[in-house]
Image (cartoon, rainbow, N blue to C red):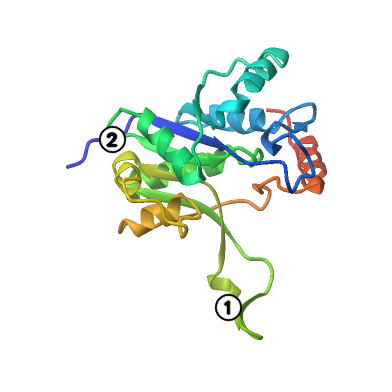
Amino acid sequence: MSQPISKAYAVIVAGGSGTRMQSALPKQFIPLHGRPIMMYTIEAFVASGYSPEIILVLHADYHGLWTELCNVHNFAVKHTLIAGGETRFHSVKNAIDQITDKNVLIAVHDAVRPLVSKTAIDKAYLCAETYGTAVVAVKSRDSVRHASGTTSASIDRESIYLVQTPQTFKSDLLRAAYTQPYNTRFTDDASVVECSGAEIKLVAGSYTNFKITFPEDITIAEALINKKPPA
């Protein structure tokens, strides 16, 4: 019989650039109501009932800037800052290598998804604790077509899910999956874990848990933050 899991981690991956945001500053640093986006992201995990230890994975060139911004904004949330790798895969592997505890839960989340809810985070931890894997996703609200050459065909959107983060796993599954050599097919943690032979469980997400990618996304995120009821 497996031992009950009593500890959780949250790996916040902040390796994005500002290219599509039309900004020289990587998008995780762009202000959202005056504070860097990823401060909101980290605070979302602090609110989780699982009280995860937080590991922030950031390119080494930006560690100084992050420390300065934490001082400016009096951001005192406890977290471990480590260097990212060549790709997202390598960045997540760096974080996993920092976690020496056995039989824990590890959630991996995009730093630029600051509107993730406590409900989604906790449901993902619970699902992973029960089944080993949990990937937050939402059904497609648009019609979907598959293109092949010069033709395309309709796909039943009822079976199509748009994958988000967090993607949460039992540590033994995630650690074993990341012993595989890097492959360009690995677009997220779920694809890495699935390739190692594990079944991926989906957890209902929210359409507000979107990845901030374009300039207009900031306006939308700020409007949604303004609508949030007081804690």
Q: Is residue 226 left or right of residue 113?
A: right
On-image quarter of the N terminus: top left
Local packing at callout 2 (Cα closer than 10 Å; few below 14, some 14-19, many 20+) is some
Q: Is residue 169 left or right of residue 16?
A: left
Q: How many marks?
A: 2
In this rendering, the answer to whether 64 lies above or below 131 is above
In 3D space, how far apart are the residues under numbered discs 1 and 2 (Cα atoms)?
39 Å
Task: Residue 66: tell me if it is visible.
Answer: yes
Question: Residue 23: which disc?
Answer: none
On-image quarter of the C terminus: top right
In this rendering, the answer to whether 176 lies above or below 185 is above
Q: What's the amino acid at mark 1? A: Asp
Residue name at image x 53 percent, y 29 percent? 56
Residue name at image x 56 percent, y 69 percent? 160
Task: Residue 199: tell me if it is visible.
Answer: no
> x and y percent of residue 182 in the render?
40, 51
View extreme (left): residue: 1
View extreme (bottom): residue: 151
* Secondary element at image label 2: loop
Q: Nearer the viewer, residue 159 or 89?
A: 89
Q: What's the amino acid at mark 2? A: Asn
> x and y percent of residue 75 in the render?
65, 17
> x and y percent of residue 90 in the render?
45, 42
Q: Which residue is mark 2?
A: 103
N-terminal of the pair, mark 1 or mark 2, is: 2
Residue name at image x 53 percent, y 18 percent? 78
> x and y percent of residue 177 in the render?
33, 49
Q: Which residue is mark 1?
A: 156
Q: Is residue 112 left or right of residue 226?
A: left
* Secondary element at image label 1: loop
